[in-house]
Amino acid sequence: IEKAKTRILVIDDEESIRYAVDAGLEFLGDYDVHFAKDGKAGIEAGIEAGIESLKSFSPDLLLVDLVLPSASGMEVLDAIRNDPDIRRPTRIVLMTGHSDPLPGQHFEDVGIDRVLNKPFKLEQLKTALFD
């Protein structure tokens, strides 16, 4: 019996980051990876909005950028906590270019399991997602 592939959703508005994550994951293993450019943006070029993808794709792992054009990473986390149609991914990784992305807040309190600082190396991506 073939084991189902781990489903990974990546929400980031920067194409270079989506490309780097895609290339990294391809190197690390065989995963079912979906991408979204924004928390709430409409479907564009086959890329669903992040919050919609959480419902339809139901990822095991979520990589979400803190700063997105229409709905921030925090709003995506709010949706995960409050929308009964969204199953919480096993691991949620916040990607950020900020040294102190959530001043005064504990990551666990908002539902973040790991923080991945941008730019990142393959080893850091692997650790954030799988270790």
Image (cartoon, rainbow, N blue to C red):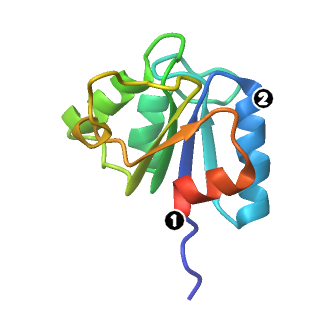
Which residue is rendered at x = 64% and y = 32% of the image?
118
Looking at the rendered structure, the kind of residue marked 1 is: Asp
Question: How far is mark 1 from mark 2, CA to CA?
Answer: 24 Å
Q: Is residue 7 visible?
A: no
Q: Secondary structure at mark 2?
A: helix
Local crowd size for mark 1, using a 10 Å CA cut-off: few (<14), some (14–19), many (≥20): few
Residue 58 higher or lower than 63, as above or below: below
Q: Nearer the viewer, residue 102 or 12?
A: 102
Earlier residue among tags 1 and 2:
2
Across and down, in percent, residue 53 comes to: 48, 37
Q: Which residue is mark 1?
A: 131
Residue 43 higher or lower than 114, as above or below: above
Q: Nearer the viewer, residue 93 or 107?
A: 107
Residue extending farthest to the top is 70
Which residue is rendered at x = 30% and y = 49% of the image?
87
Across and down, in percent, residue 13 comes to: 63, 21
Pick the quarter of the image with the N terminus: bottom right
Q: Which mark is residue 16?
A: 2
Point out the frontmost of discs 1 and 2. 1
Which residue is rendered at x = 44% and y = 24% of the image?
101
Residue 91 higher or lower than 36, as above or below: below
Q: Is residue 39 visible?
A: yes
- Residue 43 occupies quadrant: top right
- Residue 100 occupies quadrant: top left
Question: How many dots with numbers?
Answer: 2
Across and down, in percent, residue 37 comes to: 61, 24
Local crowd size for mark 2, using a 10 Å CA cut-off: few (<14), some (14–19), many (≥20): few
Taking the image as shown, residue 47 lies to the left or right of residue 76, namely: right
